[in-house]
Amino acid sequence: MGRVMWASYTANTPFNLKVIDCFLAYFAMMAAVQTAFCVVGGGWPFNAYLAGLLSCVGMFVTTASLRIHVNPANKATIIAGGGTIPTKGRAFLEWILCSLVLHLAVFNFIG
């Protein structure tokens, strides 16, 4: 089953979505590494751990939203929901702006 799913993924998924999926895997892995370090190495200063975790989770969510918007398979779902389909450039610009706002919040939280 896993091989069939992987073969279908590699054959049917566009390259730009594969790149976004790599970013999603990276953000999830970094959140896990930071949490493991906090558990093993101690959580002092705790606000730095929370800022790092917030950064990883926030970037995961915004990148997942970018993936949803640029995936051509979601076009009918977005239209049926009453929404408009942003162009790839607009979706990327929204991702950049959300990332900037997120990182401003993270930098503010670090102190």
Image: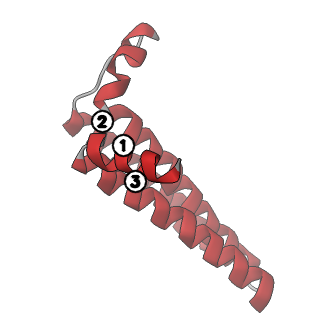
Residue in the foreground of this view, choosing between 99 and 11: 11
**Kind of residue indicated by mark 3:** Asp
**Disc marking residue 21:** 3
**Kind of residue indicated by mark 1:** Ser
Q: Secondary structure at mark 1?
A: helix
Q: Where does residue 34 sit, x and y in percent of width and height?
A: 64, 77
Rendered position, 86 above or below 91: above
Residue at point 36%, 49% (across, down): 7
Closer to the chain start, of discs 3 and 2, is: 3
Q: Where does residue 106 sit, x and y in percent of width and height?
A: 56, 64
Rendered position, 4 above or below 57: above
Residue 100 seen in this snapshot: no
Q: Mark 2 = which residue?
A: 70
Q: Name which quarter of the figure residue 36 lies in.
A: bottom right
Do the CB atoms of the residues marked 1 and 3 lie less than 8 Å apart? no
Q: Which one is closest to the eye, mark 1 or mark 3?
A: 1
How many other residues sit within 10 Å of disc 2, few (<14), some (14-19) or many (≥20)? Answer: many
42 sits to left or right of 25: right
Rendered position, 54 above or below 78: below
Q: Where does residue 108 sit, x and y in percent of width and height?
A: 57, 66
